[in-house]
Image (cartoon, rainbow, N blue to C red):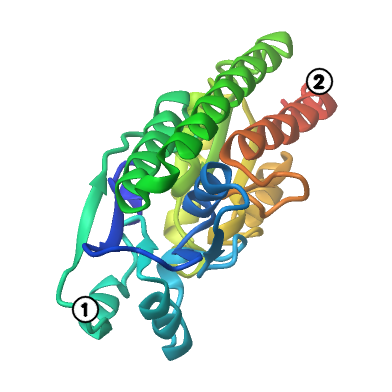
Amino acid sequence: MNIKKWGTIPALVLLFLCNVSAQEIITTTSILSSAVKEIVQDKYTAETLVPSGYCPGHFDIKGKHLAEIEKSGLLFAQGYEPYLEQVTGSIKNPDFSPLVIETEGTWFSFESQKKIYTQITKILSERLPQNRGFFESNLKNALIEIEKTDREVKELTQKHKISGISVICNTHIKDMLLYLGLNVTATYGRQEELTPSGIKNIIDTARRGKLFMVIDNLQAGPDTGKVIADELKIPHITVSNFPDAFPQTPTLRQTLYRNAELIIDTYEKYKDKVK
């Protein structure tokens, strides 16, 4: 899988093109389950295959997961999961086929969150038309909260003047950090992808300017960039690319806010010490 595509690829929604009667909706990631939960509330339950702290691209699907998907009749996925072909081949229903939710850039942006929630609501309303009004009402409320939090995040970053500060980060979170206004001078992949020459190149690039911190992606490895931060003698922090990995972050918007807080707290603590 090309990791550079993580923030830009469309999300896929897999479902049976038949009447869905299951009370449980399966999703591959907490990005989708968090949206589903807000839309369905207590009408249905949403289960996530991949734990929020894990990399979904490296998750091994097991027979029990396939059985859950078969029983549910509805699976939301993001499209890059390496096991989707296995799922499609294992499900007995011949009408199992993908639907696409278009997203561009980081899924933390207001526009991306709006698209995710809107498309999920549309699909659920088509499959469960008896709850259409309920779903659409919940969508309206969710979009209000998404816009509110997005505005609060922007106000927070402006207040603490982090726009334009230079950082190095894991590839998967680059788009999110750009959305927060940071300047990403270099990126790196997972720990097993780092080489001595690659680390040296990143460090050489960093030394050409004033770098404030190295930011890791929890799901890709919380300590991968620490060797770079230690060499440069700058702060190292870890943020999450998925909801519900940190306490009190059940949604994308709350995760974005928490990530911004972590960055700001570190910047305020070390801004006068970084050379």
Type of the residue with mark 1: Asn
- Crowd band around label 2 with a 10 angstrom C-alpha radius: few (<14), some (14–19), many (20+): few
Closer to the camera in the image, 83 or 176: 83
User: In this rendering, is residue 166 above or below 262?
Assistant: above
Residue at the left extreme? Answer: 94
Task: Please name the residue shown 44% across and 72% down the image.
Answer: 58
Q: What SS does tag 2 mark?
A: loop
Q: Quadrant of residue 175?
A: top left
**First of labels 1, 2 by sequence position:** 1
Q: Quadrant of residue 272?
A: top right
Q: What SS does tag 1 mark?
A: loop
Left of 47 or right of it: where is 89? left
Residue under numbered circle 2: 272
Specify the quadrant that holds the N terminus. Answer: bottom left
Task: Please name the residue shown 53% across and 20% down the image.
Answer: 181
Specify the quadrant that holds the C terminus. Answer: top right
The span from disc 1 to disc 2 (Cα, nearest Å) is 61 Å
Q: Quadrant of residue 8?
A: top left
Numbered mark located on residue 93 in the image: 1
Discs 1/2, front: 1
Task: Please name the residue shown 80% across and 30% down the image.
Answer: 265
Type of the residue with mark 2: Asp
User: In this rendering, is residue 159 above or below 195?
Assistant: above
Q: Position of residue 241 (x, y in %)?
A: 55, 47
Q: Position of residue 42 (x, y in %)?
A: 62, 52
User: In this rendering, is residue 64 above or below 110?
Assistant: below
Q: Position of residue 61 (x, y in %)?
A: 42, 81
